[in-house]
Image (cartoon, rainbow, N blue to C red):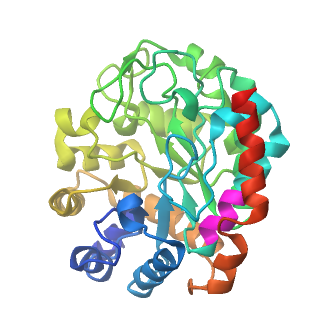
């Protein structure tokens, strides 16, 4: 039987500040949320970040996912002295799975040194549309096989070194003309096209053991003309779970993004995403929206709109992953920070990657 407090494990929240504020402490202590996502607003330097994460973990009965969007290049939340990497496009231009693995390993060493255990990377989108406003150089390139090979290598580099990877944005955001932060993209692709192009890297990543996947706020009209992937059982349950056999944890992209927030609102989006097969609902910014999401899910479970079986399945995946991968409680370690953050080896790697962009 699901205890209502356990529902908090199905949420990942962001917050303002360099220290845990009263809202996030209450969300952890009272509601038992499953994790926290950090942004630049939470990070001043490595030691402060490590202390912040140690405080967050100490407030929770269950180990927290501490996530971040650290792709390198255009999407990086960390500041100096963390190493600044050029990101996926440089790896794509190299064509080297070895470099991709080294990049993942270096990211993992710096992230884990300060207590970050989940990187929302790599982008597995195939960059098939030059005017795409949101993916572009965040992708490895436009060849599905190359994206798959490099993405899988980066995933291994992260996960072999203590940080969970998250392939995104399923089933593919690379062929959109709109940015889902601001609009709801629609693409005409059906299942045949997705299997040939967009889903190739995800299928390979799943076969290779990626632990988590993030959904796309994109409507694929040839499959589900009414709902974006995040809210679509046809895409999450049938294609990702049943066809590709993914048994890991599915994160939604931020449910405050206009692609879903404008048409459906936070409350309906949370319920529809859970019904579709998403395991963890991500709400990155607004405390009021976070409260609304929690209460909407509670009501939906109480009233039978979301089955307890669906909740138990999601909870099972979340808690199993935490048991297997999160290990002992994090304790800030200045020696680990000195060893890994901005190390000479990592700076050399970043320089090597940058050469491919200048070639």
Task: Please tell me which residue is depicted at 34% across the width and 45% down the height of the picture.
Answer: 273
In the visual, does 63 lie left or right of 355? left
Question: Nearest the camera: 35 or 225?
Answer: 35
Classify the position of the N terminus by image quarter.
Answer: bottom left
Residue 208 visible in image: no
Question: Nearest the camera: 13 or 315?
Answer: 13
| Image location of residue 211, percent across then percent down | 62, 55
Residue 118 visible in image: yes
Magenta span of residues: 106-112
Task: Please tell me which residue is depicted at 42% across the width and 24% down the height of the picture.
Answer: 133
| Magenta stretch prevailing secondary structure | helix
Is 107 magenta? The answer is: yes
Residue lying furthest top in this view? 188
In the visual, does 79 lie left or right of 185? right
Above or below 10: residue 133: above
Task: Please tell me which residue is depicted at 63% across the width and 42% down the height of the picture.
Answer: 86
Classify the position of the C terminus by image quarter.
Answer: top right
């Amino acid at each position: 039987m699901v205890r209502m407090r356990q529902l908090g494990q199905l949420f990942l929240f962001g917050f303002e500040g360099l220290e845990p504020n009263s809202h996030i402490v209450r969300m952890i202590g009272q509601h038992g949320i499953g994790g926290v996502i950090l942004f630049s607003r939470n990070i001043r330097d490595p030691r402060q970040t490590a202390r912040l994460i140690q405080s967050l973990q100490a407030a929770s009965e269950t180990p927290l996912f501490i996530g971040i969007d650290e792709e390198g290049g255009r999407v990086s939340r960390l500041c100096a002295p963390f190493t600044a990497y050029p990101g996926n496009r440089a790896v794509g231009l190299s064509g080297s799975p070895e470099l991709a693995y080294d990049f993942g390993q270096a990211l993992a060493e710096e992230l884990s040194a300060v207590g970050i255990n989940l990187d929302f990377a790599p982008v597995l989108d195939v960059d098939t549309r030059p005017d795409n406003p949101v993916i572009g150089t965040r992708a490895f390139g436009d060849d599905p096989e190359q994206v798959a090979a490099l993405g899988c290598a980066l995933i291994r580099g992260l996960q072999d070194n203590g940080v969970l990877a998250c392939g995104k944005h399923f089933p593919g955001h690379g062929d959109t003309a709109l940015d889902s932060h601001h609009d709801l993209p629609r693409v005409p692709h059906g299942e045949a096209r997705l299997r040939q192009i967009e889903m190739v890297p995800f299928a390979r990543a799943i076969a290779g053991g990626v632990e988590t996947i993030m959904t796309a706020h994109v409507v694929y009209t040839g499959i589900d003309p009414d709902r974006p992937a995040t809210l679509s059982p046809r895409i999450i349950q049938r294609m990702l779970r049943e066809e590709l056999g993914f048994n890991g944890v599915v994160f939604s992209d931020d449910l405050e993004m206009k692609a879903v927030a404008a048409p459906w609102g936070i409350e309906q989006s949370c319920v529809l995403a859970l019904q579709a097969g998403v395991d963890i609902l991500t709400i990155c910014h607004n405390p009021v929206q976070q409260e609304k999401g929690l209460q909407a899910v509670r009501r939906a479970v109480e009233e039978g709109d979301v089955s307890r079986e669906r909740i138990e399945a999601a909870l099972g995946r979340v808690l199993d992953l935490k048991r297997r991968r999160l290990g002992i409680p994090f304790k800030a370690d200045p020696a680990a920070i000195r060893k890994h953050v901005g190390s000479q080896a990592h700076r050399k790697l970043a320089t090597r990657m940058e050469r491919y962009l200048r070639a």
